[in-house]
Image (tube, helix red, strand yellow):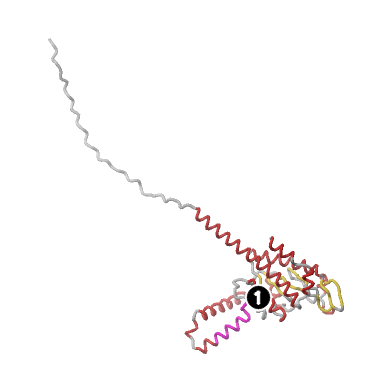
């Protein structure tokens, strides 16, 4: 936990202020349930309490770190224009899956079909790379290439999935209402940036902040991505250490000598005929009469 504590110390109120995390929406567009993290109203715009932003971000970072350290997976979701590039860059830098074009309906609630689509795309990609399309005419190969490219526009960031993610990180819960609804239905925890115009109910880890400013999105997404990376690295080290220990244990184990079940060979010695004992007659001088 030393690495995560060190990173938490870098999350400061000054950095959040400079990133513009404190700017909310216009007062008339606020959501009543967001009142708990609104600090004040200035010039008709709500100002977010950065102390609560810091606390929410630290909890979210700790959760993501622990989840990935235990082998869990997190899906980054941000389809709004100003967040797409930022989230894609941060997710790809740490090897995390992401959605930036649009949410694929049923990704969580109809996972079996989605998994088949992912397997199909991966299979087509392998066939294209290994020359499996050469048996088709040129125009058919071109059509298949365009079709595969179109599929990768939407599925390109999630082709690593074999099971549904254990958590979602969402930039704007109002924009990603479909993702939020599916996650709630499947019981998948949500970590999200929640602005003053959104309802935080049902969000496991709320990060009260500006979800429109690029600086705010960049700062928070980077913090989440670093927690993801550190958790994954610890997981890899633990797995490598466990594998090394298993190999060492196998090497130390001595092979058990196999006991031969064959009966011991018995050497039969032929009985020799008994030697004939001949009694010798005693000889001596005759006794005198």
Classify 138 as above or below 78.
below
Instruction: Please tell me whether residue 263 belongs to the stretch shown in magenta.
Output: no
User: Where, by quadrant of the figure, is residue 155 drawn?
Assistant: bottom right
Q: Is residue 182 left or right of residue 134?
A: right
User: Where, by quadrant of the figure, is residue 91 drawn?
Assistant: bottom right
Q: Is residue 201 left or right of residue 118?
A: right
Between 63 and 240, the residue placed more toward the observer is 240
Which image quarter is the C terminus in? Answer: top left
Residue under the image location 73 percent in, 79 percent down:
175
Residue under the image location 54 percent in, 87 percent down:
142
Classify 87 as above or below 288.
below
Classify 216 as above or below 232.
below
Q: Position of residue 10 (x, y in %)?
A: 74, 66
Q: Position of residue 190 (x, y in %)?
A: 71, 71
Instruction: Please tell me whether residue 152 belongs to the stretch shown in magenta.
Output: yes
Q: Is residue 203 left or right of residue 232?
A: right
Between 93 and 53, the residue placed more toward the observer is 93
Q: Is residue 114 left or right of residue 282?
A: right
User: Where, by quadrant of the figure, is residue 4 drawn?
Assistant: bottom right
Task: Give the crowd class for mark 1: few <14, some 14-19, many >=20 residues within 10 Å.
Answer: many
Which image quarter is the N terminus in? Answer: bottom right
The stretch in magenta equals 143-157
Residue under the image location 55 percent in, 59 percent down:
244
Magenta segment, prevailing SS (helix, strand or loop): helix
Q: Position of residue 18 (x, y in %)?
A: 78, 73
Q: Position of residue 284 (x, y in %)?
A: 15, 17
For mark 1, what is the residue? 98
Classify 255 as above or below 16.
above
Between 245 and 276, the residue placed more toward the observer is 245
């Amino acid at each position: 936990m030393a690495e995560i504590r060190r990173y938490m110390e870098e999350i400061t109120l000054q950095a959040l202020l400079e990133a513009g995390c404190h700017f909310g929406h216009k007062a008339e567009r606020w959501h009543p349930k967001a009142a708990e993290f609104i600090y004040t109203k200035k010039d008709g715009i709500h100002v977010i309490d950065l102390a609560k932003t810091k606390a929410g971000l630290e909890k979210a970072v700790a959760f993501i770190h622990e989840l990935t350290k235990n082998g869990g997976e997190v899906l980054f979701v941000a389809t709004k224009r100003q967040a797409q590039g930022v989230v894609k860059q941060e997710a790809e830098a740490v090897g995390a899956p992401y959605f930036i074009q649009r949410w694929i309906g049923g990704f969580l609630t109809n996972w079996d079909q989605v998994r088949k689509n992912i397997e199909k795309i991966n299979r087509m990609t392998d066939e294209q790379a290994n020359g499996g399309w050469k048996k088709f005419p040129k125009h058919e190969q071109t059509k298949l290439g365009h079709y595969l490219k179109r599929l990768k526009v939407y599925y390109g960031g999630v082709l690593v999935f074999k099971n549904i993610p254990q958590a979602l990180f969402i930039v704007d819960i109002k924009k990603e209402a479909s993702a939020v609804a599916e996650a709630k239905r499947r019981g998948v925890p949500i970590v999200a940036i929640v602005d003053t115009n959104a309802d935080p109910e049902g969000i496991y880890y709320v990060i009260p902040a500006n979800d429109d400013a690029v600086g705010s999105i960049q700062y928070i997404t980077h913090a989440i991505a670093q927690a993801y990376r550190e958790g994954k690295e610890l997981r890899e080290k633990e797995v490598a250490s466990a594998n090394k220990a298993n190999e060492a244990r196998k090497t130390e184990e001595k092979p058990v000598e196999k006991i031969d079940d064959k009966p011991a060979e018995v050497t039969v010695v032929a009985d020799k005929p008994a030697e004939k004992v001949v009694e010798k007659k005693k000889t001596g001088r005759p006794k005198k009469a």
